[in-house]
Amino acid sequence: MNKVDKIKILYIDDEQNNLNGFKATFRFDYTIYIAVNTSQAYEYLNANPDISVILCDQRMPDKTGVQFFEELRDRFPDPVRMLITGYTDIESVIDSVNRGHIFRYIKKPWTDNDIKSAIEEANKFYLTNSLLVAKNRELQSAYDELGKFAYSITHDVRGPLLSVLGALDLAKGISNKDELFDLLEMMAEAITKLDEYIKNTHEYYKLKRGLLQFAAIDFHSLLGDIAALFKIAGRNNNITFTSKVIQNESFYSDEISIKMILNNLLSNAFNYQRKNAGTKKVDVLIEVIENNLIITVSDNGIGIHEDHIRNIFEMFYRATSEETGSGLGLYNVKDALNKLDGTIEVTSEINEGTTFKVTIPGKKHDAK
Amino acid sequence: MTQNKKLNFIVIDDSKLDCFIAEKIIRNTGKCEQIRSFLKAKDALEFISNSSHDDQSRTIILVDIQMPIMNGFEFVEAFEQLPESIVNNYTIYIISSSINEADLSKVHNYRSVKQFLNKPLTSNNLSVLVG
């Protein structure tokens, strides 16, 4: 078994000999921390939050093992607690087991096998519990998001539909061709917005359910594909687009996620331009340095007000009335970055522009 | 409110199309003196707080709920903070695509909001408010 995968155990006993003997016996099987008193035990627990099993002797000078476990239940609820005790203390032990303070007790004198099987059982219990906690957290957040989606349907889906319905009703009474044409144009915009919302929702779902696939990424070709599309958009809207890639080493990560991140940041940079600006610019720089991917996307567009900047990654948050955002784009970016252990920084100035800097650590190829 | 007096309108909606529809339908009633649309609630609020009503004419405000930066409810809350001499000249209708119960019941909490109207605005449901 790999060293990092060893079960971490804390053993507290006021007799140094017991501690030494325990460590000598089990040090090859487990990572063992030994403490002669409870304050030393707390130091270990603070420094090692992943200790999964705690063994404690019942008879100690400052407090009993049962008392110690009672305190521990509030301060460190996760590790599994096991008491080591002689037969004479059995009344307090039974009481403690019944009140849920300890998982199991080990009778003195113990054999190596008693300890081993108890530890294996305790660790199984610990793993199941942590899994359950993690699953519950996931479920809660999925449930919260579902609520937000249900609410957004009435606005982001029903809104454009009702707009178009209203426009159709209105159109019946319009005979002027130009006026009708303007109306059609606006209807098309509303439907594009709806489509945008649906595409982003699909992206959200793909991201949530999809598994990451790590492979070597060639950023010259990846950016080349994406840039070609944005170049056309740039030409149509008078936006100068420059892109640059510096990659002299191989980089392993999930290409679909990185494409999604790039697409979102770029389309924001292209969309949130100042309408009447003389020179509109979007720059993207992709660098791979020492197994880190750094993507910098900057524009000289409308900028984001400092009051809104901390909220822009929230689901359905929109920081501007300009343009048609779904409120999902940057949320998806953040979500993908969480999966890839990446980070994102934003600097922005109103009417000056915005720069997003994304950093993603590469996956080690051999560690796969 | 006298029946034949003409009304002023303010439409606040972040959707250009919805503003356009509202303007059109309001104009078609023939009972509208003046109409202004705002894509941002903040701009509307500023316009209203600087407005002077020496002719005692009334203005109807149609405001959407879900808008970025300042939503319809935030707008109404800020509006109710304005001096009474201004507030009294306006009647607010909330117009939204929302079918969310929390949104609908929230409307009753504001003294300045007369009624909730469903989108899309039609000459039918508009006739209710112009009389």
Image (tube, coloured by chain):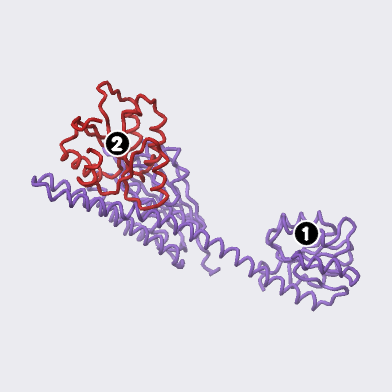
In percent of width and height, residue B39 lies at 29, 39
Decide if residue A208 is on the left or right side of residue A320: right
Task: From the image, tell me which residue sits under label 2.
Answer: B61
User: Looking at the image, how many numbered discs can be counted on the residues?
Assistant: 2
For the residue pair A5 and A215, the one nearer the viewer reads as: A5
Is residue A343 in sight in this rendering? yes
Question: For numbered disc 2, what is the local secondary structure?
Answer: strand
User: Which three-letter amino acid code belongs to the residue tagged 2?
Assistant: Ile
Hey, which quadrant is residue B107 in on the image? Answer: top left
The circle on residue A169 is: none
How far apart in space, not on screen, are marks 2 and 1 (Cα)? 63 Å
- x and y percentages locating residue B100 in the rendered image: 39, 52
**Where is residue A137 shown, x and y percent of the image?**
56, 60
Chain hosting mark 1: A
Camera-nearest label, 2 or 1: 2
Q: Front-most of A117 and A2?
A: A117
- Residue at figure coordinates x 45%, y 48% from the top left: A357
Please state the horizontal and vertical placement of residue A142, each as a whole percent of the image: 48, 61
Give the image quarter of residue A127: bottom right
Q: Which chain is red?
A: B
- Residue at mark 2: chain: B
Q: What residue is at 77 percent from the left and 68 percent from the top? A: A98
Q: Which circle marks residue A70 in the picture?
A: 1
Image colour assigned to chain A: purple
The residue depicted at 48 percent of the width and 52 percent of the height is: A359
Q: Quadrant of the N terminus of chain A?
A: bottom right
Which residue appears farthest toward the top when viewing the image? B54
